[in-house]
Amino acid sequence: MTIASLRRSAHATVSGLPQGFWWLWLSTLVNRTGAFVLTFLSLYLTSELGHSAWFAGLVVALHGLGGVAGSPLGGVLTDRWGRRPTMVTMHLAAAACAGALAVVTSAWGVALVVLLMGVAMQAVRPSINATIADMVPADDVRRAYALNYWALNLGFAVASIAGGAAAVLGYRTLFVVDAVATTLCAVIVFLRLPETRPEKAPAKAGEKPADERVSMLDVLRDAPFRTLVLLNLLVCVVFTAPWIGLPLTMAEQGLSPSSYGMVIAVNGIVIVGFQLLVNKVTERRSPVALLAVSSLLFAVGTGATALAGSAVAFAATVVVWTIGEMVHVPTNAAATARLAPEHARGRYQGVMGMSWAVAGFIAPVLAGAVVDGPGSDVLWAGTFALGVLAAAGYTVRLRRALCEEEPEAPGAPEVPASETVAGPGPEARVPEGTDGTVSPAPAERSPASSS
């Protein structure tokens, strides 16, 4: 591939998206570039405040627990209050928590602040994802999610390098910088990002407005979406396991912590360097096929960890499951938006985000218990089995819900009610999209969420 063709490919990848998306993209980049809290929190708690490693692990787990509550909360606020107010408020709340960590030193004070920070950081995600689905044409939604995920990882890489160099200034200084960056993110959203929440449909006599007809329970009753959430939970557990099990496995092989640092850095390098290329290759592909293939990549990449015996071999396994990550995250986000009714996108994104938060809370505990008990080989065999199970689930259970449909010609007759796909509540949903893409997350990055 020539330089000219690479340039054309890059231009095609970033062209055609609305200006509002790029302001949101910039806010994500700014936010993650200053995200130092979770990266250095455990070191701050142990080396600076003198707490045990057990307490440090508990505090980090509390951040994930806060995310379990924050995601559905953010989803409800996104639909009822609006995308822009929810983003601004939760970014400012996360900034306040980051600033508080610079002055709060008591053990349970720190734990409470981190818990609240987990709520705020996860609550902002449904509004971001719903905004992208609102403003970006359906054909480009997955590409937009991939670009936003790329910004998240690019900012994460910068934060990791800059934070390590700036740690000499003190951990509290890093927390203040995090607070400033998150506040700047809120300012960008407030000044440049328009509100995109769809107008409320007029209610018929005796009926509630459309956005009030879909409760969180209704979302969970949506069978195709519930299946998508459960399968994503399996994939998230597989994705989270290496962040805990990989350093322990490498230590068993006699490799140093610095070797682990270099191996896990491959994850960020591959994403920053190749996310746009992967997005170009997977463009217009079937969402079901992409979700199944990404699950198999997770399965093979993590399962092969049991066979690795050198830093190079471990790095190769990271490359495999990282490619799965680059395919899965935007595709799953887009599938969520595709299944969600327009007026309930926030709630749907909130429930999907909760699956990431739950996995981030339970996977570390399970991985540590398995390594300490049956051993690391059992852990990697288990992740392989879960990945294969998820791939089969996507193929068998979601092919119809995420099927591709030809666009209707102008003036074509309406689709009969019998051919619609049932949605939550009393309304029916006709699958959107015309080319196999699905509408749309970041989420999440690694187990550490962005602020």
Image (tube, rainbow, N blue to C red):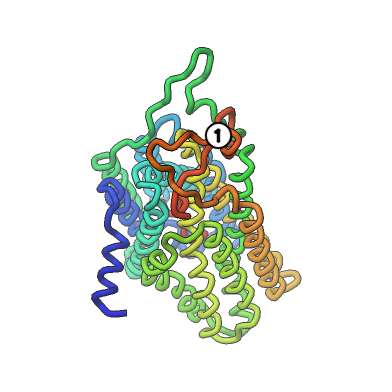
Residue 130 sits in which quadrant?
Answer: top left
x, y percentage for residue 84?
A: 35, 37
Left or right of 143: which side holds 107? Answer: right
* Residue 362 in view, yes or no: yes
Q: Residue at the location (24% across, 40% down)?
A: 191
Place of residue 69 in the rendered image (x, y in percent of width and height, measured from the top left): 55, 41
Residue 422 lies left or right of residue 10; in this view the side is right
Q: Could you say which is closer to the camera, residue 80 or residue 252?
A: 80
Question: Could you say which quadrant of the image residue 304 lies in?
Answer: bottom right
- 378 above or below 349? below
Q: Is residue 106 visible?
A: no
Which residue is disc 1 drawn over?
416
Question: How many marks on residues?
Answer: 1
Position above or below: 70 against 64 = above
Q: Residue furthest right?
A: 374
The residue under the point 50% across, 81% down is: 259
Quarter residue 435 falls in? bottom left
Packing grade of label 1 (10 A; few <14, some 14-19, many >=20) is few
Q: Position of residue 374 (x, y in %)?
A: 75, 71
- Front residue of 442/132: it is 132
In this rendering, the answer to whether 214 lies above or below 66 is above
What residue type is disc 1 on?
A: Pro
Q: Please tell me which residue is depicted at 39% across the width and 51% down the height of the picture.
A: 139
